[in-house]
Image (cartoon, rainbow, N blue to C red):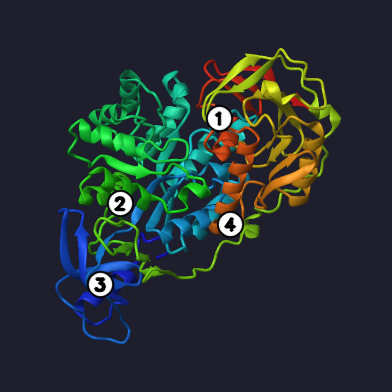
Amino acid sequence: MENGRNWRNRELRQHVKVIDGTVSPTLLLKNATYLNVHTKQWLEANIWIYEDRIVYVGEKLPNQSQETEVYDCEGKFIVPGYIEPHAHPFQLANPEITAMHAAKTGTTTLVNDNLTWYLLTNKKKAFSIIDQFNKLPISMFWWSRYDSQTTLQEENHFINTNDVLDWINHPSVVQGGELTDWPSLLAGDDRLLYWIQETKRKGKPIEGHLPGASLRTLTKMKLLGISADHEAMTGEDVMNRLQLGYMVGLRYSPIRPDLPTILEELLESGLTTFDQLTFTMDGPTPYFMKDGVINTCIQIAIDKGIPIEDAYRMGSFHAAKHLRMDEELGSIAPGRIAHMNILQEKANPNPIGVLAKGQWIVKEAKEIDIPSIIDWSKYEINEMNIDWELTDDDLQFSVPVGMDVVNDVIIKPYTIDSDVSFEELNEEKGEQFILLIDRKGKWRVNTIIRGFAPKLGALISSYSASGDIIIIGNSKKDIFIAWSRLKELKGGIILVNDGEILTEIPLPLGGSLPNEPMEQMIVYDKQLKETLQKFGFAFYDPVYSLLFLSAFHLPFFRITQKGLLDVKNRDILFPATMR
Protein backbone atom coordinates (compact mmCIF):
# COMPACT_ATOMS: atom_id res chain seq x y z
CA MET A 1 0.00 0.00 0.00
CA GLU A 2 1.81 3.07 -1.30
CA ASN A 3 0.00 6.03 0.22
CA GLY A 4 -1.14 4.58 3.52
CA ARG A 5 -4.69 4.03 2.26
CA ASN A 6 -6.77 1.14 1.00
CA TRP A 7 -4.75 -1.80 2.25
CA ARG A 8 -5.44 -4.98 0.30
CA ASN A 9 -7.30 -7.88 1.91
CA ARG A 10 -4.09 -9.88 2.16
CA GLU A 11 -2.40 -7.02 3.99
CA LEU A 12 -5.33 -6.60 6.38
CA ARG A 13 -5.21 -10.32 7.24
CA GLN A 14 -1.49 -9.98 7.89
CA HIS A 15 -2.13 -7.09 10.30
CA VAL A 16 -4.58 -9.24 12.28
CA LYS A 17 -2.03 -12.06 12.44
CA VAL A 18 0.31 -9.66 14.23
CA ILE A 19 -2.27 -9.40 17.02
CA ASP A 20 -2.64 -13.19 17.05
CA GLY A 21 1.12 -13.57 17.47
CA THR A 22 1.69 -15.56 14.28
CA VAL A 23 3.40 -12.62 12.56
CA SER A 24 5.90 -10.34 14.31
CA PRO A 25 5.62 -6.54 14.26
CA THR A 26 8.34 -4.83 12.28
CA LEU A 27 8.80 -2.12 14.94
CA LEU A 28 7.96 -1.95 18.65
CA LEU A 29 7.88 1.38 20.48
CA LYS A 30 8.29 0.17 24.03
CA ASN A 31 7.39 2.08 27.23
CA ALA A 32 5.77 4.89 25.28
CA THR A 33 3.94 7.85 26.78
CA TYR A 34 1.72 8.99 23.94
CA LEU A 35 -0.99 11.59 23.36
CA ASN A 36 -4.36 10.01 22.79
CA VAL A 37 -6.03 12.76 20.73
CA HIS A 38 -9.47 11.19 21.19
CA THR A 39 -9.46 11.55 24.99
CA LYS A 40 -6.82 14.35 25.30
CA GLN A 41 -4.84 12.15 27.68
CA TRP A 42 -1.19 11.19 27.89
CA LEU A 43 -1.22 7.41 28.26
CA GLU A 44 1.41 4.75 28.72
CA ALA A 45 1.48 1.94 26.17
CA ASN A 46 3.51 -0.26 23.89
CA ILE A 47 2.94 0.57 20.24
CA TRP A 48 3.24 -2.18 17.64
CA ILE A 49 3.87 -1.24 14.02
CA TYR A 50 3.73 -3.57 11.06
CA GLU A 51 5.39 -2.02 8.03
CA ASP A 52 3.43 1.23 7.49
CA ARG A 53 0.53 0.70 9.92
CA ILE A 54 -0.08 0.91 13.65
CA VAL A 55 -1.61 -2.44 14.61
CA TYR A 56 -1.73 -2.30 18.41
CA VAL A 57 -1.60 0.28 21.20
CA GLY A 58 -1.82 -1.08 24.73
CA GLU A 59 -0.15 -2.79 27.69
CA LYS A 60 0.91 -6.01 25.99
CA LEU A 61 4.27 -6.79 24.44
CA PRO A 62 4.60 -9.01 21.37
CA ASN A 63 6.48 -12.28 21.42
CA GLN A 64 10.21 -11.74 21.18
CA SER A 65 11.46 -11.97 17.62
CA GLN A 66 14.59 -11.02 15.74
CA GLU A 67 12.27 -9.67 13.04
CA THR A 68 11.12 -6.84 15.33
CA GLU A 69 13.11 -3.66 15.86
CA VAL A 70 12.66 -2.50 19.46
CA TYR A 71 12.92 1.20 20.35
CA ASP A 72 12.67 2.11 24.03
CA CYS A 73 10.70 5.32 24.55
CA GLU A 74 11.23 5.55 28.31
CA GLY A 75 11.24 9.23 29.30
CA LYS A 76 10.06 10.37 25.87
CA PHE A 77 6.66 11.46 24.54
CA ILE A 78 4.95 10.48 21.28
CA VAL A 79 2.46 12.54 19.29
CA PRO A 80 0.86 11.99 15.88
CA GLY A 81 2.73 13.14 12.78
CA TYR A 82 1.79 16.71 11.95
CA ILE A 83 -0.46 17.58 9.01
CA GLU A 84 -0.15 20.62 6.71
CA PRO A 85 -3.67 20.84 5.23
CA HIS A 86 -2.93 23.74 2.88
CA ALA A 87 0.45 23.35 1.19
CA HIS A 88 1.84 25.15 -1.86
CA PRO A 89 4.94 22.97 -2.32
CA PHE A 90 6.20 24.81 -5.42
CA GLN A 91 7.37 28.06 -3.79
CA LEU A 92 10.99 28.17 -4.97
CA ALA A 93 11.12 24.43 -4.31
CA ASN A 94 9.69 21.27 -5.76
CA PRO A 95 7.16 19.06 -3.95
CA GLU A 96 9.61 16.28 -3.18
CA ILE A 97 12.23 18.45 -1.48
CA THR A 98 9.48 20.44 0.28
CA ALA A 99 7.86 17.28 1.65
CA MET A 100 11.07 15.63 2.80
CA HIS A 101 12.24 18.85 4.47
CA ALA A 102 8.91 19.16 6.27
CA ALA A 103 9.08 15.53 7.39
CA LYS A 104 12.43 16.05 9.15
CA THR A 105 10.68 18.35 11.62
CA GLY A 106 7.59 16.19 12.03
CA THR A 107 5.15 17.26 9.30
CA THR A 108 4.53 13.88 7.72
CA THR A 109 1.39 14.67 5.69
CA LEU A 110 0.91 17.46 3.15
CA VAL A 111 -2.27 18.37 1.27
CA ASN A 112 -1.04 20.20 -1.81
CA ASP A 113 -2.09 22.70 -4.45
CA ASN A 114 -2.34 21.15 -7.93
CA LEU A 115 -2.14 24.40 -9.93
CA THR A 116 1.47 23.97 -11.05
CA TRP A 117 0.64 20.61 -12.63
CA TYR A 118 -1.89 22.41 -14.84
CA LEU A 119 0.84 24.79 -16.01
CA LEU A 120 3.77 22.35 -16.33
CA THR A 121 2.30 19.22 -17.85
CA ASN A 122 -0.86 17.46 -19.02
CA LYS A 123 -3.36 15.60 -16.84
CA LYS A 124 -2.13 12.12 -17.70
CA LYS A 125 1.46 12.91 -16.76
CA ALA A 126 0.32 14.80 -13.66
CA PHE A 127 -1.59 11.76 -12.43
CA SER A 128 1.43 9.57 -13.09
CA ILE A 129 3.72 11.84 -11.11
CA ILE A 130 1.40 12.12 -8.10
CA ASP A 131 1.13 8.33 -8.09
CA GLN A 132 4.93 8.30 -7.89
CA PHE A 133 4.80 10.74 -4.96
CA ASN A 134 2.67 8.16 -3.14
CA LYS A 135 5.76 5.98 -2.90
CA LEU A 136 7.48 8.49 -0.62
CA PRO A 137 7.45 7.68 3.11
CA ILE A 138 5.42 10.79 3.83
CA SER A 139 1.75 11.10 2.79
CA MET A 140 1.12 13.41 -0.17
CA PHE A 141 -2.43 14.41 -0.99
CA TRP A 142 -3.74 17.12 -3.32
CA TRP A 143 -6.61 19.50 -3.86
CA SER A 144 -8.40 20.26 -7.12
CA ARG A 145 -8.27 23.85 -8.36
CA TYR A 146 -11.30 25.54 -9.88
CA ASP A 147 -9.45 28.60 -11.18
CA SER A 148 -5.94 29.67 -12.14
CA GLN A 149 -5.63 32.73 -9.82
CA THR A 150 -4.84 34.82 -12.87
CA THR A 151 -6.24 35.61 -16.33
CA LEU A 152 -5.00 33.14 -18.94
CA GLN A 153 -5.30 33.47 -22.71
CA GLU A 154 -6.53 29.88 -23.01
CA GLU A 155 -8.24 29.40 -19.64
CA ASN A 156 -10.43 26.50 -20.83
CA HIS A 157 -7.37 24.67 -22.10
CA PHE A 158 -5.98 24.60 -18.56
CA ILE A 159 -9.08 24.33 -16.38
CA ASN A 160 -12.23 22.79 -17.84
CA THR A 161 -15.04 20.55 -16.65
CA ASN A 162 -13.54 17.26 -17.83
CA ASP A 163 -10.22 17.92 -16.15
CA VAL A 164 -11.72 19.29 -12.92
CA LEU A 165 -14.01 16.28 -12.54
CA ASP A 166 -11.15 13.86 -13.24
CA TRP A 167 -9.05 15.59 -10.57
CA ILE A 168 -11.92 15.48 -8.09
CA ASN A 169 -12.32 11.75 -8.68
CA HIS A 170 -8.64 10.96 -8.19
CA PRO A 171 -8.05 9.00 -4.95
CA SER A 172 -5.15 11.26 -3.93
CA VAL A 173 -7.32 14.38 -4.20
CA VAL A 174 -9.03 15.01 -0.86
CA GLN A 175 -10.55 18.48 -1.21
CA GLY A 176 -11.63 21.13 -3.69
CA GLY A 177 -10.28 24.68 -3.90
CA GLU A 178 -8.74 26.88 -2.91
CA LEU A 179 -11.50 29.03 -4.34
CA THR A 180 -9.89 32.35 -5.22
CA ASP A 181 -12.45 33.25 -7.88
CA TRP A 182 -15.36 33.40 -5.43
CA PRO A 183 -16.61 36.74 -6.89
CA SER A 184 -17.53 34.82 -10.06
CA LEU A 185 -19.39 32.25 -7.97
CA LEU A 186 -21.40 35.01 -6.28
CA ALA A 187 -22.00 36.65 -9.67
CA GLY A 188 -23.74 33.52 -10.98
CA ASP A 189 -21.06 31.24 -12.47
CA ASP A 190 -23.03 27.98 -12.52
CA ARG A 191 -20.19 25.97 -13.99
CA LEU A 192 -18.12 26.79 -10.91
CA LEU A 193 -21.06 25.91 -8.65
CA TYR A 194 -21.45 22.59 -10.48
CA TRP A 195 -17.81 21.72 -9.82
CA ILE A 196 -18.25 22.55 -6.15
CA GLN A 197 -21.39 20.44 -5.88
CA GLU A 198 -19.70 17.49 -7.57
CA THR A 199 -16.82 17.76 -5.09
CA LYS A 200 -19.27 17.76 -2.17
CA ARG A 201 -21.06 14.73 -3.60
CA LYS A 202 -17.73 12.89 -3.40
CA GLY A 203 -17.62 13.70 0.30
CA LYS A 204 -14.69 16.08 -0.11
CA PRO A 205 -14.63 19.51 1.59
CA ILE A 206 -14.09 22.82 -0.19
CA GLU A 207 -11.34 25.24 0.84
CA GLY A 208 -12.21 28.92 0.40
CA HIS A 209 -10.00 31.96 -0.05
CA LEU A 210 -11.96 34.80 1.54
CA PRO A 211 -9.71 37.61 2.81
CA GLY A 212 -11.64 40.50 4.29
CA ALA A 213 -15.00 38.85 3.58
CA SER A 214 -18.00 40.33 5.41
CA LEU A 215 -20.40 38.23 7.47
CA ARG A 216 -22.87 38.56 4.60
CA THR A 217 -20.35 37.17 2.10
CA LEU A 218 -19.21 34.43 4.47
CA THR A 219 -22.84 33.38 4.93
CA LYS A 220 -23.44 33.27 1.17
CA MET A 221 -20.30 31.22 0.61
CA LYS A 222 -21.39 28.73 3.28
CA LEU A 223 -24.72 28.35 1.48
CA LEU A 224 -22.85 27.69 -1.78
CA GLY A 225 -20.80 24.89 -0.24
CA ILE A 226 -17.55 26.32 1.15
CA SER A 227 -16.32 24.25 4.11
CA ALA A 228 -13.15 25.98 5.30
CA ASP A 229 -11.09 29.13 5.03
CA HIS A 230 -7.51 30.11 5.92
CA GLU A 231 -7.70 33.85 5.23
CA ALA A 232 -8.69 35.14 8.68
CA MET A 233 -6.36 38.01 9.59
CA THR A 234 -7.60 38.81 13.11
CA GLY A 235 -9.13 37.03 16.05
CA GLU A 236 -12.47 38.59 15.13
CA ASP A 237 -12.18 37.15 11.60
CA VAL A 238 -11.58 33.71 13.11
CA MET A 239 -14.55 33.97 15.47
CA ASN A 240 -16.85 35.07 12.63
CA ARG A 241 -15.88 32.00 10.64
CA LEU A 242 -16.15 29.64 13.60
CA GLN A 243 -19.62 30.89 14.47
CA LEU A 244 -20.76 30.18 10.90
CA GLY A 245 -19.42 26.63 11.03
CA TYR A 246 -16.22 26.98 9.01
CA MET A 247 -13.10 24.97 9.67
CA VAL A 248 -10.53 27.73 10.11
CA GLY A 249 -6.86 27.46 9.17
CA LEU A 250 -4.74 29.70 11.40
CA ARG A 251 -1.99 31.00 9.17
CA TYR A 252 1.68 31.65 9.83
CA SER A 253 3.19 32.58 6.47
CA PRO A 254 5.94 34.82 5.06
CA ILE A 255 3.59 37.69 4.24
CA ARG A 256 0.98 36.98 6.93
CA PRO A 257 2.82 35.94 10.12
CA ASP A 258 -0.38 36.61 12.04
CA LEU A 259 -0.53 33.48 14.18
CA PRO A 260 0.88 34.84 17.48
CA THR A 261 -1.44 37.86 17.50
CA ILE A 262 -4.50 35.88 16.41
CA LEU A 263 -3.97 33.32 19.17
CA GLU A 264 -3.67 36.11 21.75
CA GLU A 265 -6.92 37.64 20.51
CA LEU A 266 -8.74 34.29 20.55
CA LEU A 267 -7.72 33.59 24.13
CA GLU A 268 -8.65 37.13 25.18
CA SER A 269 -12.08 36.61 23.62
CA GLY A 270 -12.62 33.62 25.93
CA LEU A 271 -12.42 30.87 23.32
CA THR A 272 -11.92 27.50 25.03
CA THR A 273 -12.89 25.09 22.25
CA PHE A 274 -10.36 24.65 19.48
CA ASP A 275 -11.81 21.69 17.55
CA GLN A 276 -12.52 23.72 14.39
CA LEU A 277 -8.99 25.12 14.11
CA THR A 278 -5.98 23.91 12.15
CA PHE A 279 -2.57 25.39 11.31
CA THR A 280 -1.07 26.25 7.95
CA MET A 281 2.04 27.97 6.63
CA ASP A 282 0.15 28.61 3.36
CA GLY A 283 3.11 27.92 1.06
CA PRO A 284 6.21 29.18 2.86
CA THR A 285 9.28 30.07 0.85
CA PRO A 286 12.42 28.07 1.76
CA TYR A 287 14.01 30.51 4.21
CA PHE A 288 10.76 30.94 6.15
CA MET A 289 10.51 27.20 6.80
CA LYS A 290 14.15 26.69 7.70
CA ASP A 291 13.04 25.56 11.18
CA GLY A 292 10.16 23.45 9.98
CA VAL A 293 6.48 23.73 9.15
CA ILE A 294 3.63 22.73 11.48
CA ASN A 295 6.03 22.14 14.39
CA THR A 296 6.71 25.89 14.31
CA CYS A 297 2.98 26.68 14.50
CA ILE A 298 2.44 24.25 17.39
CA GLN A 299 5.31 25.83 19.30
CA ILE A 300 3.81 29.30 18.88
CA ALA A 301 0.44 28.01 20.11
CA ILE A 302 1.94 26.39 23.20
CA ASP A 303 3.97 29.50 23.96
CA LYS A 304 0.83 31.66 23.69
CA GLY A 305 -1.08 29.53 26.18
CA ILE A 306 -3.12 27.11 24.06
CA PRO A 307 -3.46 23.87 26.09
CA ILE A 308 -0.71 21.49 24.95
CA GLU A 309 -3.11 18.71 23.99
CA ASP A 310 -5.20 21.09 21.89
CA ALA A 311 -2.11 22.51 20.18
CA TYR A 312 -1.07 19.04 18.99
CA ARG A 313 -4.63 18.21 17.91
CA MET A 314 -4.73 21.45 15.90
CA GLY A 315 -1.53 20.34 14.17
CA SER A 316 -2.74 16.83 13.36
CA PHE A 317 -6.11 15.33 14.29
CA HIS A 318 -8.34 18.30 13.42
CA ALA A 319 -7.08 18.40 9.83
CA ALA A 320 -7.49 14.63 9.43
CA LYS A 321 -11.07 14.76 10.73
CA HIS A 322 -11.95 17.70 8.49
CA LEU A 323 -10.59 15.87 5.45
CA ARG A 324 -12.50 12.68 6.37
CA MET A 325 -9.22 10.84 6.89
CA ASP A 326 -9.22 10.48 10.68
CA GLU A 327 -9.34 6.68 10.47
CA GLU A 328 -6.00 6.79 8.67
CA LEU A 329 -4.21 9.90 9.92
CA GLY A 330 -3.92 12.25 12.87
CA SER A 331 -3.89 9.86 15.81
CA ILE A 332 -1.97 7.04 17.45
CA ALA A 333 -4.44 4.18 17.35
CA PRO A 334 -4.85 0.79 15.66
CA GLY A 335 -5.35 1.02 11.91
CA ARG A 336 -3.70 4.38 11.43
CA ILE A 337 -0.73 5.05 9.18
CA ALA A 338 2.41 4.96 11.32
CA HIS A 339 3.17 8.68 11.28
CA MET A 340 4.58 9.62 14.71
CA ASN A 341 6.89 12.13 16.34
CA ILE A 342 9.05 11.33 19.35
CA LEU A 343 9.63 14.31 21.66
CA GLN A 344 11.99 15.03 24.53
CA GLU A 345 9.36 17.14 26.32
CA LYS A 346 5.60 17.53 25.98
CA ALA A 347 5.91 21.28 25.41
CA ASN A 348 8.59 20.96 22.72
CA PRO A 349 7.04 19.92 19.37
CA ASN A 350 10.43 19.71 17.62
CA PRO A 351 10.97 15.95 17.39
CA ILE A 352 14.11 13.95 18.05
CA GLY A 353 12.52 11.06 16.20
CA VAL A 354 10.17 10.97 13.21
CA LEU A 355 8.42 7.94 11.78
CA ALA A 356 6.61 8.20 8.46
CA LYS A 357 4.72 5.15 7.20
CA GLY A 358 6.67 3.22 9.82
CA GLN A 359 10.02 4.31 8.37
CA TRP A 360 12.56 6.33 10.31
CA ILE A 361 13.05 9.83 8.92
CA VAL A 362 14.86 11.06 12.02
CA LYS A 363 16.21 8.74 14.74
CA GLU A 364 17.88 9.93 17.94
CA ALA A 365 18.05 13.43 16.44
CA LYS A 366 19.96 12.16 13.39
CA GLU A 367 18.43 12.52 9.93
CA ILE A 368 18.19 9.35 7.87
CA ASP A 369 19.21 9.68 4.24
CA ILE A 370 16.13 9.09 2.08
CA PRO A 371 17.05 8.89 -1.63
CA SER A 372 15.08 10.89 -4.18
CA ILE A 373 12.61 8.85 -6.19
CA ILE A 374 11.19 11.41 -8.65
CA ASP A 375 12.68 11.30 -12.14
CA TRP A 376 11.34 14.57 -13.55
CA SER A 377 12.52 13.87 -17.10
CA LYS A 378 10.27 10.81 -17.18
CA TYR A 379 7.32 13.21 -17.10
CA GLU A 380 8.92 15.59 -19.63
CA ILE A 381 9.46 18.31 -17.02
CA ASN A 382 12.79 19.38 -18.42
CA GLU A 383 14.92 22.48 -18.84
CA MET A 384 13.31 25.54 -20.37
CA ASN A 385 14.67 25.85 -23.90
CA ILE A 386 14.05 29.38 -25.21
CA ASP A 387 14.46 29.36 -29.00
CA TRP A 388 13.55 33.00 -29.62
CA GLU A 389 15.16 36.36 -28.85
CA LEU A 390 14.19 39.39 -26.86
CA THR A 391 14.47 42.47 -29.10
CA ASP A 392 14.59 46.24 -28.81
CA ASP A 393 11.01 46.34 -30.06
CA ASP A 394 9.92 44.32 -27.03
CA LEU A 395 11.26 47.02 -24.73
CA GLN A 396 8.95 49.80 -25.89
CA PHE A 397 6.82 51.27 -23.11
CA SER A 398 3.97 53.56 -24.18
CA VAL A 399 1.03 52.54 -21.97
CA PRO A 400 -0.17 55.57 -19.96
CA VAL A 401 -1.05 53.60 -16.80
CA GLY A 402 1.52 51.92 -14.56
CA MET A 403 1.56 49.59 -11.54
CA ASP A 404 2.09 51.21 -8.14
CA VAL A 405 3.27 48.62 -5.58
CA VAL A 406 1.73 49.63 -2.24
CA ASN A 407 2.70 46.58 -0.17
CA ASP A 408 3.19 42.81 -0.46
CA VAL A 409 -0.31 42.25 -1.83
CA ILE A 410 -1.75 45.55 -3.06
CA ILE A 411 -0.93 47.11 -6.45
CA LYS A 412 -2.78 50.22 -7.63
CA PRO A 413 -2.88 51.83 -11.08
CA TYR A 414 -1.29 55.24 -11.51
CA THR A 415 -0.90 57.71 -14.35
CA ILE A 416 2.60 57.69 -15.83
CA ASP A 417 3.78 61.28 -16.22
CA SER A 418 7.48 60.54 -16.77
CA ASP A 419 9.30 60.24 -20.06
CA VAL A 420 10.01 56.50 -20.16
CA SER A 421 11.55 56.40 -23.64
CA PHE A 422 15.12 56.32 -22.33
CA GLU A 423 17.46 53.34 -22.16
CA GLU A 424 17.61 53.79 -18.40
CA LEU A 425 15.11 55.19 -15.90
CA ASN A 426 16.05 57.53 -13.10
CA GLU A 427 15.60 55.77 -9.78
CA GLU A 428 14.38 58.94 -8.03
CA LYS A 429 10.76 58.34 -9.04
CA GLY A 430 11.00 54.68 -8.07
CA GLU A 431 10.00 53.56 -11.57
CA GLN A 432 11.15 50.53 -13.57
CA PHE A 433 10.20 48.87 -16.81
CA ILE A 434 8.05 45.77 -16.40
CA LEU A 435 7.33 43.18 -19.06
CA LEU A 436 5.35 39.94 -18.91
CA ILE A 437 6.24 37.88 -21.94
CA ASP A 438 4.97 34.52 -23.16
CA ARG A 439 7.43 31.71 -22.50
CA LYS A 440 7.11 30.76 -26.19
CA GLY A 441 7.49 34.35 -27.38
CA LYS A 442 4.00 34.80 -28.81
CA TRP A 443 2.86 37.92 -26.91
CA ARG A 444 3.97 40.52 -24.39
CA VAL A 445 2.49 43.05 -21.94
CA ASN A 446 4.51 46.20 -21.17
CA THR A 447 4.13 48.97 -18.65
CA ILE A 448 5.95 50.76 -15.81
CA ILE A 449 6.09 49.55 -12.21
CA ARG A 450 6.72 51.89 -9.31
CA GLY A 451 8.02 50.91 -5.86
CA PHE A 452 9.37 47.42 -6.55
CA ALA A 453 13.19 47.62 -6.39
CA PRO A 454 13.86 50.99 -8.05
CA LYS A 455 17.66 50.94 -7.82
CA LEU A 456 18.02 47.58 -9.62
CA GLY A 457 19.12 47.34 -13.22
CA ALA A 458 17.28 44.12 -14.03
CA LEU A 459 15.42 41.16 -12.61
CA ILE A 460 14.28 38.35 -14.87
CA SER A 461 12.27 35.38 -13.69
CA SER A 462 10.78 32.35 -15.38
CA TYR A 463 9.07 31.72 -12.02
CA SER A 464 5.63 33.35 -12.14
CA ALA A 465 1.96 32.69 -11.44
CA SER A 466 1.22 31.87 -15.08
CA GLY A 467 4.48 30.17 -16.06
CA ASP A 468 5.52 33.11 -18.24
CA ILE A 469 8.62 35.32 -18.00
CA ILE A 470 8.71 38.44 -15.83
CA ILE A 471 11.22 41.22 -16.58
CA ILE A 472 11.64 44.22 -14.25
CA GLY A 473 14.43 46.80 -14.30
CA ASN A 474 15.52 50.37 -14.81
CA SER A 475 18.23 49.54 -17.40
CA LYS A 476 17.57 47.99 -20.81
CA LYS A 477 21.24 47.06 -21.06
CA ASP A 478 21.02 45.05 -17.83
CA ILE A 479 17.76 43.49 -19.00
CA PHE A 480 19.48 42.05 -22.09
CA ILE A 481 22.33 40.70 -19.91
CA ALA A 482 19.80 39.02 -17.62
CA TRP A 483 17.97 37.64 -20.67
CA SER A 484 21.14 36.03 -22.03
CA ARG A 485 21.83 34.43 -18.66
CA LEU A 486 18.26 33.11 -18.41
CA LYS A 487 18.70 31.36 -21.75
CA GLU A 488 22.00 29.85 -20.57
CA LEU A 489 20.47 28.61 -17.29
CA LYS A 490 17.36 27.39 -19.15
CA GLY A 491 15.14 28.70 -16.40
CA GLY A 492 15.67 30.69 -13.24
CA ILE A 493 15.71 34.04 -11.47
CA ILE A 494 18.58 36.43 -12.26
CA LEU A 495 19.44 39.82 -10.78
CA VAL A 496 21.76 42.17 -12.70
CA ASN A 497 23.05 45.67 -11.97
CA ASP A 498 25.60 47.79 -13.87
CA GLY A 499 26.39 44.82 -16.12
CA GLU A 500 27.14 42.46 -13.20
CA ILE A 501 25.14 39.35 -12.33
CA LEU A 502 24.47 39.72 -8.59
CA THR A 503 22.36 36.67 -7.77
CA GLU A 504 20.93 33.79 -9.72
CA ILE A 505 18.70 30.85 -8.83
CA PRO A 506 18.62 27.97 -11.33
CA LEU A 507 15.13 26.57 -11.96
CA PRO A 508 15.79 23.75 -14.41
CA LEU A 509 12.43 21.97 -14.05
CA GLY A 510 10.19 23.69 -16.56
CA GLY A 511 11.63 27.07 -15.62
CA SER A 512 9.57 26.98 -12.41
CA LEU A 513 11.09 24.43 -10.06
CA PRO A 514 14.57 23.75 -8.67
CA ASN A 515 16.16 20.35 -8.30
CA GLU A 516 18.55 21.09 -5.45
CA PRO A 517 18.31 20.25 -1.73
CA MET A 518 16.22 22.47 0.50
CA GLU A 519 19.35 23.58 2.34
CA GLN A 520 20.64 25.15 -0.88
CA MET A 521 17.27 26.71 -1.68
CA ILE A 522 17.21 28.32 1.77
CA VAL A 523 20.55 29.96 0.91
CA TYR A 524 19.30 31.10 -2.50
CA ASP A 525 16.07 32.46 -1.03
CA LYS A 526 17.94 34.48 1.60
CA GLN A 527 20.36 35.85 -1.02
CA LEU A 528 17.50 36.90 -3.29
CA LYS A 529 15.76 38.83 -0.54
CA GLU A 530 18.92 40.48 0.80
CA THR A 531 20.10 41.53 -2.66
CA LEU A 532 16.76 43.04 -3.61
CA GLN A 533 16.57 44.92 -0.31
CA LYS A 534 19.89 46.59 -1.13
CA PHE A 535 18.27 47.94 -4.29
CA GLY A 536 15.13 49.31 -2.66
CA PHE A 537 12.81 46.33 -2.26
CA ALA A 538 10.82 47.29 0.84
CA PHE A 539 8.49 44.34 1.32
CA TYR A 540 8.71 41.01 3.07
CA ASP A 541 9.01 38.29 0.46
CA PRO A 542 10.05 38.88 -3.19
CA VAL A 543 9.01 35.38 -4.27
CA TYR A 544 5.42 36.19 -3.33
CA SER A 545 5.73 39.61 -4.93
CA LEU A 546 6.64 37.94 -8.23
CA LEU A 547 3.71 35.53 -7.96
CA PHE A 548 1.24 38.25 -7.02
CA LEU A 549 2.03 40.47 -10.02
CA SER A 550 -0.52 38.42 -11.99
CA ALA A 551 -2.88 37.31 -9.22
CA PHE A 552 -6.47 38.46 -9.78
CA HIS A 553 -7.62 37.59 -6.25
CA LEU A 554 -5.74 40.63 -4.88
CA PRO A 555 -6.50 44.35 -5.40
CA PHE A 556 -6.40 46.37 -7.60
CA PHE A 557 -4.31 46.17 -10.78
CA ARG A 558 -2.38 43.23 -12.28
CA ILE A 559 -0.31 42.27 -15.30
CA THR A 560 -1.68 39.10 -16.92
CA GLN A 561 -1.48 37.07 -20.12
CA LYS A 562 -4.42 39.00 -21.56
CA GLY A 563 -3.09 42.42 -20.58
CA LEU A 564 -3.31 44.93 -17.73
CA LEU A 565 -6.25 43.93 -15.55
CA ASP A 566 -8.64 46.03 -13.46
CA VAL A 567 -9.24 43.40 -10.78
CA LYS A 568 -12.50 44.75 -9.35
CA ASN A 569 -14.30 44.96 -12.68
CA ARG A 570 -12.33 42.13 -14.36
CA ASP A 571 -11.70 44.42 -17.33
CA ILE A 572 -8.58 44.31 -19.49
CA LEU A 573 -7.61 47.98 -19.73
CA PHE A 574 -4.69 47.49 -22.12
CA PRO A 575 -4.47 44.17 -24.01
CA ALA A 576 -1.38 42.09 -24.65
CA THR A 577 0.61 42.81 -27.82
CA MET A 578 1.24 39.95 -30.22
CA ARG A 579 4.90 39.63 -31.22
Vertical order, 26 against 274 (above or below): below
Residue 212 at what x, y percent from top left? 39, 24
The label on residue 73 is 3
Of labels 2 and 4, the one closer to you: 4
Left or right of residue 333, residue 81 in this image: right
Between 370 and 26, the one nearer to me in the picture = 370
Residue 58 at what x, y percent from top left? 16, 69
Callout 4–callout 3 Cβ contact below 8 Å: no
Amino acid type for the residue under numbered disc 1: Ala
Local SS, label 2: loop
The label on residue 316 is 2
How far apart are labels 1 and 4 at the CA level? 28 Å
Of labels 2 and 3, the one closer to you: 3
How far apart are labels 4 and 3 at the CA level? 34 Å
How far apart are labels 2 and 4 at the CA level? 29 Å
Local SS, label 3: loop
Between 201 and 351, the one nearer to me in the picture = 351
Q: Quadrant of residue 211?
A: top left
Of the residues under marks 1 and 3, which one precedes in the sequence? 3
How far apart are labels 2 and 3 at the CA level? 21 Å
Of labels 1 and 4, the one closer to you: 4
Of the residues under marks 2 and 3, which one precedes in the sequence? 3
Q: Residues within 10 Å of mark 2 (few under 14, many from 20)?
A: many
Residue drawn at point x = 21 percent, y = 51 percent: 309
Of the residues under marks 1 and 4, which one precedes in the sequence? 4
Left or right of residue 364, residue 416 in this image: right
Q: Which residue is tagged 4?
A: 520
